Image: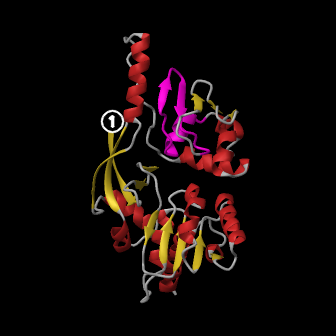
Amino acid sequence: MKNFSCEDAKQIDMVDYLAYLNHHPKKVHNQDFWYLSPLREEKTASFKVNRQKNVWYDHAVGKGGDLIDLGTLYHNCSVSELLGRLSEYQARPVLSFHPPTISDNLSGANSRFAGEKKETESSKIVVLDSRQLAAKELLNYLEKRCILLEIANRFCKEVDFLLYGKKHTVIGFQNNSGGYELRSENFEGSSSPKDITFVDNRSDDVAVFEGFFNFLSFCTVNKSLTTPLSNCLILNSLSFFEKSRSLMEHYNQVHLILDRDSAGMNRTKQALQWNHDKYIDRSDFYQGHKDLNDWLIHHQHSQRQSQRQGKRL
């Protein structure tokens, strides 16, 4: 398999990739897709993607470029790290995020209006129903990620949602504002509103995670503990890290269990600079792995392999 290059990256449809990151246009005019900037907070959509040229421009800050420029800023990573992410993105059997085609027999003015309205409505993830996890493909996915079903059932739901007129069923992890982080073998996204999830275990400490699968991994690893776990803060996005500082400061110790990529390590370094006595980097536990769930998967597989070898002796 050939290495994924910058030229390969530039062929990725930027509108599709932004949808994969759960950023959807507020309006569409011909080939121009207008977003609330994914790089900063704003209330008026000033971030434009020209889908035909596959380039972006943030009018509020006067900056733009191609997908590589956007990706390195968004993920706070190097070009080589971004190419790794994009290679994995291309390899995933992801859902289609193309908006519905507008009929050509509409007049020019009506076509633009209909297109903008339909894109706004259909590109939103609409949660239809939630229930206890039961779908076989979702249970298989949890097993693949080495998450115990009893733990997943405590914190997750099976969620039906609608996107671009199609119904999908995934694992849902609810945040404090009622939105869901949505995951399956083939999908990664979230429903509005986006927010943190806080699990209160009546502790004086708090453990901080970027994503909920690392939180579920933490619960799986510590399943045999007789004492309560620390409180748990699941950011659901690193963009909530600084915003959650006031919450974290309430606790005696803050255990940082963030990803070991450049973005996660930068946030860990930042917190240690805030207060190196309060904030503790726990990522050495899974050194050599990208995150706690990656460590858990490798650890479980190694244990099973050792058990199989032991039986042959």
Q: Position of residue 69 (x, y in %)?
A: 69, 40
| Amino acid at pointer 1 | Gly
Which residue is at 67% across, 34% downward? 66
Q: Estimate how packed mark 1 is, as few (under 14), some (14 to 19) or many (20 or more) residues with alpha carbons within 10 Å.
A: some
Q: Which residues are magenta?
A: 12-40
Q: Position of residue 119 (x, y in %)?
A: 42, 30
Q: Position of residue 57 (x, y in %)?
A: 65, 32
Q: Find out whether residue 265 is within the magenta segment.
A: no
Q: Find out whether residue 33 is within the magenta segment.
A: yes
Q: Quadrant of residue 184?
A: bottom left
Please, is residue 260 above or below residue 79 in the view? below
Q: Quadrant of residue 261?
A: bottom right
Which residue is at 65% across, 44% downward? 71
Q: Nearer the viewer, residue 236 or 7?
A: 236
Q: Position of residue 109 (x, y in %)?
A: 43, 13
Tell me: 138 left or right of 85: left
Q: Does the rendering let one see residue 100?
A: no
Please, is residue 227 above or below residue 142 in the view? below
Q: Which residue is mark 1?
A: 165
Q: Does the rendering let one see residue 59?
A: yes
Q: Nearer the viewer, residue 72 or 11?
A: 72
Please, is residue 82 above or below residue 223 in the view? above
Q: Nearer the viewer, residue 139 or 112?
A: 112
